[in-house]
Image (spheres, helix red, strand yellow):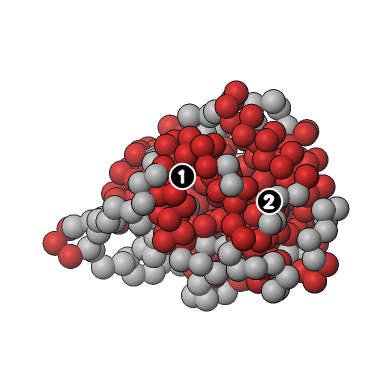
Amino acid sequence: MGTRGSPAVSPPPPPPPLGRVRRRPAQVFDAALDDVELCAARAALAQGRWQVVRTLLTRTGDDWDRRDHRIAVLAREPYCAAWARDWLLAEPDSADAAALLAVALVRHCLRGKEKPTRAREACRVAAALAPGDPTPWLGLLMLERRTGDDAGFVRAFEQVRARHTDHHHAHHLMIARLAERRADAGPDPLHEVYDFAAWAAEGAPADSPLAVLPVVAHAERYRVLAAAGVEPGDPVASGHWAGRRARQVLKAAFDWWLEWEHEGHPRRLVDLNFLAHAKVCEGRGAEAAALFHRIGDHATPEPWSYPDRDPLAAFRAARDRALGTG
């Protein structure tokens, strides 16, 4: 690596044919959710106009959940790392460019197209450029989630949380990791994933979307149990959401949503999909319908894909039943 961690020069990606940006057809999962500015910046980045991304991230500032959501979405694009390198060549001290490159390399690594050591080093370089930014540590957390051990994963989570206590994405990753422990233990209501979710939700401010974490924990644990053959492959038929604790958790989360609905949180639609899925599984069609109205077309693959279902088909079928449009 060169000065301040800027990577070696690499050839830029070829421009899109005829300067066109690929269009995403309707009703396809889009990680950008309803962030219109992010969609515009992503389209600009596809054409190599990283300056638009720079402006977007400058405006985002230290709204950490929004910043991390935007960088994580941009980093999904196959051309992102190449254009982030170009940006770093032009601005070697840019913490935004370094964070974008780091998370892009993490994404490449998770697809088997980059070495973990290079992605890990890029995260550390980006963290050194902006010590207060949780984004490079989120990248490292994503990497450790798939390639590391428990100790490394927990250390990365603690680093994220030290910079933003209520970090939404990081808590979801922790829930998913914890849910995978002791897969053969069966539907244990005292499993550690439920304890962690309750602890995080209770310790967060009253208006924090972490209030939905206990619902996420139930979905993630179902994913693990169903994959292990302990629960049926049909979540509605599983009864996983029918126990007393599950019902209490769902009621508390739905009541929280009614009181504190966050129209502006960048990842609120992730929570709404988890909550709608749970209400469908619980058999509360009217409450599920209210959530589907808020979700609109912004479905997320998780948890509709759990354990191994076609997520779009599952989402549409559940929505049609709840809204009576099937």
Q: Which amino acid does label 2 sit on?
A: Trp
Figure quadrant of the N terminus: bottom right
Task: Judge from the rendering whether residue 96 lies leftward or rightward of residue 151; answer left or right.
Answer: left
At 53% across and 29% down in the image, what residue appears?
Answer: 262
What is the count of numbered marks?
Answer: 2
Packing grade of label 2 (10 A; few <14, some 14-19, many >=20) is many
| Nearest to N terminus: mark 2 or mark 1 | 2
**Residue 78: x percent and y percent?**
39, 65
Q: What residue type is labelled 1?
A: Ala
Residue 236 drawn above or below residue 52: below
The secondary structure type at the circle numbered 1 is helix
From the image, tell me which residue sits under label 1: 322
Task: Judge from the rendering whether residue 11 lies leftward or rightward of residue 59; answer left or right.
Answer: left
Name the foreground residue: 35 vs 270.
270
Q: Is residue 128 visible?
A: no
Task: Judge from the rendering whether residue 299 lies leftward or rightward of residue 112; answer left or right.
Answer: left
**Residue 128: x percent and y percent?**
63, 49
The secondary structure type at the circle numbered 2 is loop
**Residue 88: x percent and y percent?**
43, 54
